Amino acid sequence: MSSNSKANNNSSSNGEKKQVVCVTGAGGFIGSWVVKELLLRGYHVRGTARDPADSKNAHLLELEGAEEKLSLCRADVLDIGSLRSAFSRCHGVFHVASPVSNDPDLVPVAVEGTRNVINAAADMGVRRVVFTSSYGAVHMNPNRSPDAVLDETCWSDYEYCKQTDNLYCCAKMMAEITATEEADKRGLEVAVVVPSMTMGPMLQQTLNFSSNHVTRYLMGTKWSYPNAVAAYVDVRDVARAHILVYERPDARGRYLCIGTVLHRAHLLQMLKDLFPQYPVTAKYATIILPVESI
């Protein structure tokens, strides 16, 4: 079935039991799982992609319920008109789309793209938006006490992130702030999911950043590891968290999504035990590395 014919089917589905929702970045690691969980719950889903016909999105069409309840539409977060078309007759939007990169150009793109998503959603009468932030917007602050408990009130230090080339953290922080500020201006309900390093089974064919985080150690291409701890969460829990905050009318603000905290040495020992045939590194580095390098 073509994307256009699926879209037409979805247009008549508003009277069905479940709502029509849109997921930006539907073909990505987290986005794919959000789509999968929404379909399993009976939602009619529109997934955005720059090129819906690209083979990297083919896995979405194989998901359970996709033939009846999924349509893929062409949209770009920098093109507000394409977003308005994607959000037409949708009750909710899940803004998941975001590249993981330390490219300096990412910050203005992330901010402008998020502003477009919020305003397009408001223009089209969308009731509620769930925004995918990142733990990188929370924990990168050298002035915080080591004994301090991280919670939803914590923010990364923008200048520190910039100085240490953690520009992805800068982008997610500014995009999240933009989402909440624009939503307040437009009277739109918004809830923010803040996942830590997200691991788990991939639905997509291409290797994503957080999965590569482990692959580099297994393949011996990462020669050392930082003497530090990191927070991890299962991608399936992240997807379910998105839907939980969408379905709870009282859910507002930020929700940290963390499954466990491990020292990198502990993580690598787990990898050695599970995969003894791979050359997992045993050296650690004490220098501060950009998030993309860790």
Image: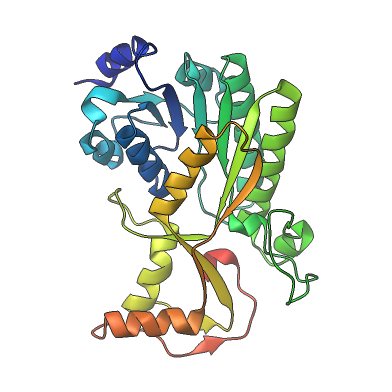
Residue 231 falls in image quadrant: bottom right
Q: Residue at x 38, y 72 (%)?
A: 216
Q: Residue at x 44, y 32 (%)?
A: 23
Q: Residue at x 78, y 70 (%)?
A: 144
Given the current orientation, which residue lies at the most extreme bottom position? 282
Determine if residue 97 is in view.
Answer: no
* Residue 239 vertical placement versus 168 (above, below): above
Horizontal arrangement in the rendering, residue 119 relative to residue 267 (left or right): right
- Residue 78 location, x and y as percent? 57, 29
* Residue 63 vertical placement versus 237 (above, below): above
Determine if residue 258 is in view.
Answer: yes
* Residue 191 vertical placement versus 102 (above, below): above
Residue 149 falls in image quadrant: bottom right
Given the current orientation, which residue lies at the most extreme right position? 143
Choose between 209 and 150: the one closer to the eye.
150
- Residue 4 location, x and y as percent? 29, 16
* Residue 22 vertical placement versus 251 (above, below): above
Choose between 35 and 252: the one closer to the eye.
252
